[in-house]
Amino acid sequence: MENGRPPSADEREERCPSSLFRSHLVCGSIGVRATQMEAIELADRCGFDAVEARCEFLSSCDTATLDAIATDLLARELSFGTANLPVNFHDDEATFQADLKCLPRIARNLRRAGVTLFSTWLAPCHGAWPFDFHFELHVRRLNLIADVIEREGFKLGLEYLAPQTLRAGWPYSFIYSLAQTVELLNAVGRKCLGILLDSFHWYTANETVKDLLALPFGSVLGVDLNDAPLGTQVNAQRDNERELPCATGVIDLRGFLQAIAMRLSSAVPVRVEPFNAHLNSLPCEQALSLAMKSLHCAFSLLEQTVDAAHSEYKRITSRVN
């Protein structure tokens, strides 16, 4: 890799065209293996606005390295998007407390590098915990997490997981809808917490544009943008079988994005997370190009028709492949 090479003028034009959404590279989500520094280089080369922050790497860096990374991102006109919350709050108390104890140090390191947003997921079911117990446990634990991240200048986006196939066979369901996520956020009552909203989960929860428009202003902190496979009923959709945005037109991404745009108080990172076997099998450069261009097709939905965006996706797919 050509570390430090600035992008060309043409590559600069590939930056996300919308002031509301920041194209966010998460290499693992498209089958690309890269270190933190390689991911920064790839994001810059391919025209992304933001790149995933790796907790394990950044938390181990000294202050000089963190400052150098922050300076490098600024020079590239890049920023960090999200970092996975390094706290397991889904299981036993001992594990939670051990992770919570490490969180202040990790947060301070990440903040010095320029990271300001954590994200994590909510379990849609559990093998032993009934809903009410599970809910109160989350309220308590998320408040303890909020105590730390609020002090360090972070926000945390919570993502619900909606497919019915994820809950099949489990004795207790938990949070798997937008309304339940908002209920949890209201119960916790912390301004540093919000929603990481995935179009695939919105679709598989049978939710509507009206549901999005009812969200509190500024509550969406990040977006995962995916399409769904053709020929599969919504209740049979599987979490690890998705498509890049605009690939199929199954999900109303135009209504999704337009509604979210009306609820944003500031620009948010948007990443693709298709868990797609074909995409994962492609060479690195092809996977990155498809991911970036699929985001641009989706962002164009703010200004053009669904058919036009889908046609553009088909055009760039044939060219890249």
Image: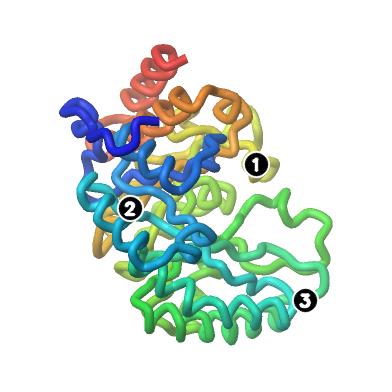
Q: Do the residues labelled 3 and 2 touch (CB within 8 Å)?
A: no
Mark 1 Cα shell of 10 Å, populated few (<14), some (14-19), many (≥20): few
Mark 3 → mark 2, Cα distance in angstroms: 35 Å
Quarter of image, res 71: bottom left
Task: Report the front residue among 8 and 191.
Answer: 8
> Which of the image's four quarters has the N terminus?
top left
- Residue type of the residue flagged with mark 1: Asn
Q: Do the residues labelled 3 and 1 touch (CB within 8 Å)?
A: no
Marks 2 and 1, the one that precedes in the sequence: 1
Q: Residue at x 48, y 51 (%)?
A: 198
Foreground mark, 3 or 2, reads: 3
Describe the element under mark 3 as helix, strand or loop.
loop
Marks 3 and 2, the one that precedes in the sequence: 3
Left-right relation of 94 to 155: right
Q: In this view, does 178 lie above or below 279?
A: below
* Residue 170 coordinates in the image, percent (x, y): 81, 61
Foreground mark, 2 or 1, reads: 1
Marks 3 and 1, the one that precedes in the sequence: 3
Describe the element under mark 2 as helix, strand or loop.
helix
- Residue type of the residue flagged with mark 2: Ala
The answer to whether any part of residue 279 appears in the image is: yes
Q: Name the residue under label 1.
A: 240
Mark 3 → mark 1, Cα distance in angstroms: 25 Å
Q: Which residue is drawn at 34% across and 36% down?
A: 3
Q: Which mark is residue 129?
A: 3
- Residue type of the residue flagged with mark 3: Trp
Q: Name the residue under label 2.
A: 259
Task: Report the front residue among 78 and 167.
Answer: 78
